[in-house]
Image (cartoon, helix red, strand yellow):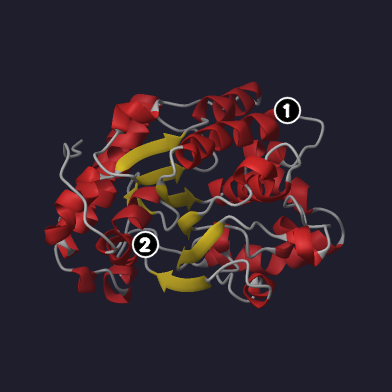
Amino acid sequence: MSLEALSGTTDRSLLLVHGRDFKPSVEAYTDLSMAALRSGIERDCPNLLESFDAIQKSVAWYGDLNAEVLQARGKYYDENLDIGDRRNALTALREITVRKKFGIRQYDQLPGKSAVPEAIVDIAAPILGAIGLCVPMIRTVSQDFARYFDRKSEYAMQVRARLREQLCALMDRDARIVLVSHGTGSVVAYDVLWQLSHDPDLKEQYGDKKVELWVTLGAPLGDANIRKRLLGAKEKPKTKFPLSVISWHNVAAEDDYTCHDNTLADDFKMMLQRRVVSAVQDYRIFNLAVRYGKSNPHSSIGYFIHPRMTKILADWLKVGDTEASPKYTF
């Protein structure tokens, strides 16, 4: 999707990165995601609606690449049903008009709520990683994400190129950027940020450019088996980490097995020690999204509309004035 299609009236830009699995069209995904983010602002910080509407908005979308991998494995996707269910989830979440309601009491009442998947991953991941079975385990859950770690595949390079093109275009404009990545999209975002910092073909032009705020939602970056497969993981400390982020906020939902290791400040504390990032802050939340009649703590809609995400975005919006532009609906 072109940046012009979602251009606001300021130099501020919000760039979303989705994660694994099938995704609706870029238009549908963008509309629903921005509507969820805007709904949180409208609920908690209505005075910042014009500021939110004024920022440029875009999505680094690679849903077609995910679909190609999954369909080759015989997977089927009903896009209209998916869009309808995402809308239903957002409608239900919009009905929660008090931010204090996004707590454990409401979460415990959700249908199908279960801590079992996260508990299984907590136990299995270290064992399988120690005996070299981490990627096969990922492959059983997410064939497209497993393909990302397949060095013989071009999928990872194509996915990173999609995000890199969008991010570099914003940096070329000297935009003030908030990068929001969901799930395994946070791995893609990390790798691209590392490339811009250290790749010989990129660092001269982009090595000094910064993302003001990076927000990771349900990110698997706390998993040691994932971290050792990140770009730069085997480098010396000087070139091990991205240098392109000022502040990093990580939000992890209870029972979201994708981020079963839900804290990142401890895993990336060397970035702080080496002063290549100003902050790495962790938050634990309850994701109240219900998908297909069952609690889904990894739902992007649930993360986007949550008061914690709203607070992070609102704090960023408060720094400086913006002007109004067209509103998002769905």
Q: Is residue 192 left or right of residue 217?
A: right
Q: Is mark 2 on a helix, strand or loop?
A: loop
Quarter location, residue 86: top left
**306 or 213, nearer to the observer:** 213
- List x then y, in percent, for residue 159: 61, 33
- List x then y, in percent, for residue 313: 32, 60
Q: How far apart are marks 1 and 2 (CA)?
A: 34 Å
Above/below status of 92 relative to 288: above
Above/below status of 38 relative to 3: below
Residue with the mark numbered 2: 287
Q: What element carries label 1?
A: loop
Report the mark closest to the observer, 1 or 2: 1
Is residue 329 visible from the viewing direction of this image?
A: yes
Of the two numbered discs 1 and 2 on the same chain, state the one appearing first in sequence.
Answer: 1
Q: Which residue lies furthest to the right in this view?
A: 131
Q: In this view, does 94 lie to the left or right of 269?
A: left
- Residue kind at label 1, given as amino acid type: Glu
Counting the numbered discs, the total is 2
- List x then y, in percent, for residue 60: 48, 36
- List x then y, in percent, for residue 33: 32, 43
Residue with the mark numbered 1: 154
Above/below status of 93 relative to 204: below
**197 or 266, nearer to the observer:** 197
Crowding at dot 1, Cα within 10 Å, few <14 / some 14-19 / many 20+, comes out as few
- Residue kind at label 2, given as amino acid type: Asn
Crowding at dot 2, Cα within 10 Å, few <14 / some 14-19 / many 20+, comes out as many
| Quadrant in the picture for the C terminus | top left
| Quadrant in the picture for the N terminus | top left
